[in-house]
Amino acid sequence: MQEFTFFLGNRPGALLEVASALAEEKVNIEAIAALTVLDEAVVSLITDAPDKTRKVLKRLGVDYEEREALTLSLPHQPGQLATVLDRLARDGINVLSCYFAAEKNMLAFTVDDLARAKAIFRLG
């Protein structure tokens, strides 16, 4: 899965423009995190069609950063996120983003050492 992270202006409809353009291309948003920091909207999203997502963002003039995202299905119990984060921290792996995906209990995250994180969690 690919994560796309970008800044948008902090104005009504800014995120709507991106979401609508993705919908027009039949791109489904699998996971999203968005918040405003110092008057800039910061958005991270994962879609089911990275190639189309790149095309849409470029067409809209949105500069983005792209990273491979990992996903884990977690039991719905207290402490599950802490367990994942502890395991990464013990190996010196920095989490760059972390949020839950649309699929129930699916954690999406990016890290600064992809190969080691994949090995830890036995991800392809």
Image (spheres, rainbow, N blue to C red):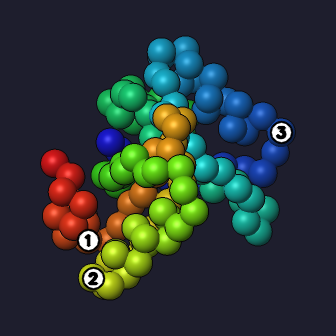
Q: Residue at x 71, y 31 (%)?
A: 16
Q: Position of residue 99 (x, y in %)?
A: 54, 54
Quadrant of the drawing holding the N terminus: top left
Q: Residue at x 39, y 35 (%)?
A: 54
Q: Marks 2 and 3: CB-CB under 8 Å?
A: no
The reply, left or right, for residue 55 in relation to residue 100 is left
Q: Which residue is mark 1?
A: 113
Between disc 2 and disc 3, whose residue precedes?
A: 3
How many residues crowd mark 1 within 10 Å: few (<14), some (14–19), many (20+)? Answer: some
Between disc 2 and disc 1, whose residue precedes?
A: 2
The reply, left or right, for residue 70 in relation to residue 75 is left
**In the image, which is nearer the foreground, mark 2 or mark 1?**
2
Q: Which mark is residue 12?
A: 3
Q: Position of residue 109 (x, y in %)?
A: 42, 57
Q: From what the image shows, is residue 57 above or below residue 107?
A: above
Q: Given the image, on which type of amino acid does mark 1 rest?
A: Asp
How many residues crowd mark 3 within 10 Å: few (<14), some (14–19), many (20+)? Answer: few
How many residues crowd mark 2 within 10 Å: few (<14), some (14–19), many (20+)? Answer: few
Q: From what the image shows, is residue 27 above or below residue 7?
A: above
**In the image, which is nearer the foreground, mark 2 or mark 3?**
2
Visible residue check, residue 21: yes
Q: Given the image, on which type of amino acid does mark 2 rest?
A: Asp
Q: Given the image, on which type of amino acid does mark 3 rest?
A: Pro
Q: Marks 2 and 1: CB-CB under 8 Å?
A: yes
In the rendered image, which quarter is residue 24 located in? top right
Between disc 1 and disc 3, whose residue precedes?
A: 3
Q: Which residue is mark 2?
A: 91
The answer for how far apart the CA atoms under marks 1 and 3 are is: 36 Å
